[in-house]
Amino acid sequence: MKTITIIDDSHLDSNLIKVWLETNKAYNVHTMYHSGIDAIANAEDINTDICLVDAHMPLLNGVNTITILLKHHYNGKLILMSHAFSLKCMVEAKNAGAHAYCHKDKESLINTLAKAESELVCFDEKSFETWKQKSSVIDLHRKDKDPRVDRLNTHHHKILSYSCKGLSTEEIGELMNLKKHTVEQYRAAMLQLLEFKSLAQATAWAVANNLVKPGDVYTPQQNPNLD
């Protein structure tokens, strides 16, 4: 039975991947870290056969996490995962010394793990090409989109959407199964990626780029008795 370490800032994704792998009965999830920084702090203790690393994490992304783990002489196989394929991310993963790069879904992950056991490196380029073809029609309509849109991962998009709707940090945390400080970290990272200083700026930008419908933006009710 192969032992696995999962490094993923999403508690939901981590637990889901754990279920996928342990249902397979060929893998045992030994440890889970919810940030690259936490994993690096415990790098000397990570000695599992395989390490699954999420590509898009705040503060320290997946590629940098892999690079540092290798400097700490991690001897297992490193696999970078992502909800959305990126050719740039794939190339960076190869250059960093990862053994594989795959889509973060059950079928892709299990197939990649099986291949990684018998091959030195295996990158899911076929799946990337399939995803690219499916996305090409959408991309034709987004030639003029702000490039900052592509900087945001799934969690950033959700937090931005919920924030625009006026939900509190606690409410967002409950909906996304995240702790309050994790939501705050995501929001701060999102603003930094977008190069904004306030949520109001991010909200206006989100509406302008069709990420949020104008009617969904929360507007505090004004007191009609006030001038």
Image (tube, rainbow, N blue to C red):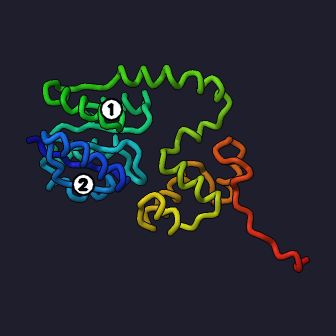
Left or right placement of residue 185 versus residue 92 in this view = right
Does residue 150 show up?
Answer: yes
Q: Quadrant of residue 56?
A: top left
| Residue type marked 2 | Met
- In this view, which residue lies farthest toward the right? 227
Question: Image point 51% across, 50% down: which residue?
Answer: 156
| Residue type marked 1 | Cys
Give the answer, above or below, for where 183 lies relative to 147. below
Q: Do labels 1 and 2 touch, CB within 8 Å?
A: no
Q: Marks 1 and 2, Cα distance to the nearest angstrom? A: 19 Å
Name the residue carrying label 1: 102
- In this view, which residue lies farthest toward the left? 1
Question: Image point 18% across, 41% down: which residue?
Answer: 50
Left or right placement of residue 167 versus residue 80 in this view = right
**5 and 176: which one is in front?**
176
Name the residue carrying label 2: 32
Coordinates of residue 175 in the picture (x, y in percent): 48, 60
- How many residues crowd mark 1 within 10 Å: few (<14), some (14–19), many (20+)? many
Does residue 75 show up?
Answer: no
